[in-house]
Image: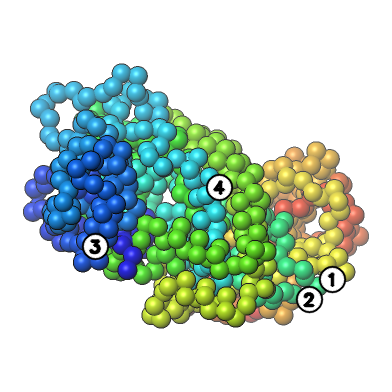
Amino acid sequence: MKTKVIILTLALGASTCLLTAQDDNPPRDGQRPLSREGGPGSELGGDGSGKTEVLTDAQKEQAKVILSKYDANTLTAEKARAIHEAFHQAGLRGGPAMSDTIKAAGFDPDKLRDLAPPPGQAVGRDRRPPTSRRSGAKPESREGNRAQGGDDRPQPRGQEARGQGQYSIEQAVSDRAQLNTIAFDGLAFLTGDFGCNTFLPPGKVADFCGFQYMRDVDSNQLGHNTSFVPRAANNVLYILSDEQKAKLVALAKEQETMLTDFVQKRFPLIQAFCRQLEGNFPPGSAGLSREAVMKYTAGLYEIDGLLSYRRAEVLGGIVRSLTDQQKEYLARMVFNNSATWPELKDQIDKRSLTHTAHVAVMTYASEMFSWYAGSVEADVYFCPERHATYFGSFYMKDIPAMGNANFSISTSLTGDSGEAFLAALTESQRKLITGLVDQQRADLTEIVKTRSAIATELRRFMKETSVEKDKVMVLSRRYGELDGEVSYFYAAAFAQVAKTLTADQKRTLLKLRNLDAKFICKGAYLYSQAIATPEVPNTDFLLAASAATKPASATGAAAPEAAKSALVLRSPEVADGGQLPKDYTGDGAAATLPLEWSGAPEAAQSFAVIMHHIDPEGKAKWYWLLYNLPASTRSLPQNVKDVGTLGNNSVNGRTEYAPPHSKGPGAKTYVYTVYALSEPVRLEVKPSEVSRDVLLAAMKDSILATAELRVVYSRLDGGTGQVGSQDQ
């Protein structure tokens, strides 16, 4: 039986138990709980939670096995460090039971601790918990060690820019860490299914606040414990004013829809990867299109960029408004030692919010501390499995712990399972997996640089009211392209391995999956919340077709070679792949969507915009045709008027915008396309006779570049539509 360590399966909404873990014995109303000295070295001295740590017989036996390799009489600091590291890797945590086990093996736990502090504990570090100071007392600060935000706030103690122990960006992208992660992904993908692959810890979204780093370097060993998020969050919420807390609540409610949009947009990509594995291609297709995958993930990461930008904007505003007293409190909280954070009851009334919004508030509050107390280096840091998250490894690793606070997972699961997976392959199969390390190297290097640029820009919000949103969005799209390319490499290699697996190998891999039958996925996941299997839009566009069968373009017009440009279309109201707000449909105000574009070719003399939808029968329906927009046009406001020329629509035939109604069940995808043209459109028919086909034919030879914005709309039950419409 492998020894295990409790993991945090949710940073933003996985399970109610994570945000109620400390409600078992809450302090009485109005009572400030005393913080506990559990501190660094929790393998021997407790976890700081005040609760007795119980060891199973198997865990006690494993501790004895580790200690049996050493002689208590000749113990050195080097050997003590090795013992601590072995305990840590095995997931053994401290308390009286652990001390008794060490004594029973003939060792002195105090001597073991004194010879060498456990991983992450600095000798002599101030571990005092935050306590009330006398009025007017100044917090301690270290000369020349100001926080990265650039202001004069007291520096929270314990921050280390270069990483603690093995935790650094260099370690995360190292060949060994990446190979273990890739192999674990391969095992999960080849033994799982679509539903398993949709599972995603929400902490992997908009992660530029240094929270992952703070978790990994916590010397109190609570970084992956269910109490970690609420412990950090409640301390922040405790000191915030009602006005400051209201901003976090408003942000949670504001971002709830976009967070859902993000995870739903992953579904088509995951479906396409499954089709690659199964060899389920459309006619004439050779498999996944790298270009299409990268373009799609660029849109996905645009949502991530919008979430990150807005989050930093709100958190930065709160940071700028902190009082000296609030700063003093935060300065007493050590960044990498959660033992110095008092245990407080929930500072937000859960009944006033939806579960998702409440979890978001707790997440934002905890991230505010890691961001405020951290550094750019902490913000850039990521764990090895941060990218290419579409292959089911998070499900395989985390699902047994969901809703089970007493369940533990081996800290060596990824490495051990990955090595076993590689060992089960033939040499040629193994090379397909190990070769991915070199294949993705350039992308990972650029990912680190891109994250650094985004994190640096977002940190400016701590001092400024606005930063360059366009820069963040361009970087975010590039980040998405890089993640898409890495994911494409993985999907292609895993599918190649699958083609040559023998029946014996398949049985071996299923055993390595090591999940009970009760963990068979019966649907899908919205982050880590189980849902019914969703209706996924057609994914043929992600699978390349041969030149003989490939359609002219997704928009129905052949784009010339010159069309390859940096033209990008976006909307301030919805990200690419996101949910179209109701106001822009027939169920709302029926307004036209505001649009913005950039990167147009210098030779562009005119622009045109088309909004269309392809129905289940493959027929195109169009809602908005606007052409002969001036060359200087780079945006269209909501309900645009008096610019360009309107064509007709397929809903009622009139020369106007026809809002979609999404008739029938399931989500429908609508595509906005902007065309950069070398000359204005010349037509010999009246605007009322200009259909989508007529306009596309007229533009065919003058298209310099195109860009698309895809949105999704699901009509709510009881929604009222336009009388006589048949959509759509």
- Residue 636, compared with residue 669, is above or below; it is above
Q: Is residue 312 visible?
A: no
Question: Is the C terminus in the top left, top right, bottom left or bottom right quadrant?
Answer: bottom right
Which residue occupies 72% across, 46% down?
A: 567
Front label number (1 vs 4): 4
Which element is circle 3 on? Answer: helix
Numbered label attached to residue 299: none
Give the residue number, with chain letter if any, for mark 1: 549
Front label number (2 vs 3): 3
Q: Residue 496's x, y, as percent?
A: 68, 67
Task: Please say if the residues under marks 2 and 1 sit with CB atoms less than 8 Å apart.
Answer: yes
Residue density around tag 2, few if under 14, some if 14–19, many if 20 or more, within 10 Å: few
CA–CA distance in space, label 3 to label 1? 64 Å
Q: Nearer the viewer, residue 393 or 707?
A: 393
Question: Is the N terminus in the top left, top right, bottom left or bottom right quadrant?
Answer: bottom left
**N-terminal of the two: label 4 or label 2?**
4
User: Would you say 284 lies left or right of 243 here?
Assistant: right
**N-terminal of the two: label 3 or label 1?**
3
Which element is circle 2 on? Answer: loop
Front label number (4 vs 2): 4
Residue density around tag 3, few if under 14, some if 14–19, many if 20 or more, within 10 Å: some
CA–CA distance in space, label 2 to label 1? 8 Å
Front label number (3 vs 1): 3
Q: Residue 532's x, y, as percent?
A: 46, 77
Q: Residue 59's x, y, as percent?
A: 25, 62
**N-terminal of the two: label 2 or label 1?**
2
Give the residue number, with chain letter if any, for mark 2: 283
Numbered label attached to residue 175: 4
